[in-house]
Image (spheres, grey):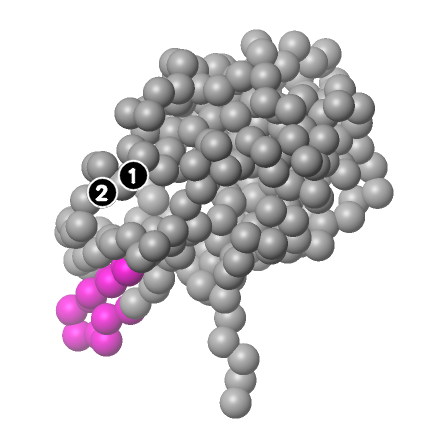
Amino acid sequence: MPSVKPWFEEWFNHPLYLDVYSHRDDADARRLIAAVLPFLNIPAGSPVLDLACGTGRHAVVLAESGLQVTGVDLSENLLAIAGKETARLGHSIELIRSDMRYLNLKKSFSAVFSLFTSFGYFDDDRENFSVFRVISDHLEPGGWFVFDYLNDPFIRQHLVPSDERRLEGARLIQNRRIEGRVLIKQVTIEKPGQEPLHFNEKVHLYTADELVPVLWAMGLTEMHRLGTLDGDPWTPESPRLILICKKS
């Protein structure tokens, strides 16, 4: 029997993925980068890594800020779009296809960015936390790690069990539930005269109290904690958990 691809490998590489997340636009990326860069205070020309860069929304903003950007993603489709967009805008951004768990670029960076909940996709804690080791290994001493992730208490309190909306020529249905420590979203796309398409997303939920000690064990010390894309201080009611850590 053919092997079944992990959900993230199938879904993130599907053309309809970007239609479902069209509300995550360049303005969101600009807000977040504008909020976090002042904390880092890294010189223009510094090398930075955008891990799970997708279509390059954040990578482009980082390049516009004068940084030397490398973007890594597993999705061939998203990387192809990123390449076209960065070329159109005239940015020199190195784009690399790799699974973040096994990344070894043999160079270090002044900052690594993991944005838009690009974490918690794997089956167990060991695999998920191994990504922090990869990140630490790619940071120069004194380098920065910016981690933008779901805020567990906010998600549990404000979870929307289901919604639906129109895509171009299709109906999008999203059902969400939490099973233990895993947020599961079932995505159904219905087009007239066609069989429905079904995709799953599974993201492990971790609290800040769980993540910070793991990061510290990897040599990454929390320096700042934000709760919104605009850089507001974190509270349990914040929609995001944004940790800004420094490598010792």
**What's the mark number on residue 224?**
none
Q: On screen, 164 above or below 212? A: below
**Few, some or many residues within 10 Å of mark 2 (<14, 14–19, 20+):** few
Residue 218 is left or right of residue 225, and the answer is right
For residue 232, which quarter of the picture?
top left
Answer whether residue 80 is visible to the viewer in this image: no
- Give SS at disc 2: loop
Q: Identify which residue is drawn at 68% across, 36% down.
A: 217
Estimate the spatial distance between the alpha carbons at disc 2 and disc 1, rounded to whole Å: 5 Å
Rendering quarter of residue 68: top right
Q: Residue at x 32, y 35 (%)?
A: 153
Quadrant of image for the C terminus = top right
> What is the x, y in percent for residue 77?
52, 55
Q: What's under tag 1, amino acid-wise?
A: Ile
Res 201 seen here: yes
- What residue is disc 2 on? 159
Q: Is residue 130 magenta?
A: no
Which residue is label 1 attached to?
155
Magenta stretch in the rendered image: 186-197
Q: Identify the element where label 1 is drawn.
A: helix
The residue positioned 40% from the left and 14% from the top of the image is 233
Residue 58, given in percent of the width and then of the height, sits at 52, 30
Q: In the rendered view, would you say 128 is above or below 244?
A: below
* Relative depth, front residue between 196 and 3: 3
How many circles with numbers are drawn on the protein? Answer: 2
Residue contact between numbered discs 2 and 1, judged by CB atoms under 8 Å: yes
User: What is the residue that sits farthest to the bottom in this orientation?
Assistant: 1
Residue count near mark 1 (Cα–Cα under 10 Å), binned few <14, some 14–19, many ≥20:
some
Of residues 99 and 203, which is closer to you in this image? 203
Q: Position of residue 102 (x, y in %)?
A: 71, 54
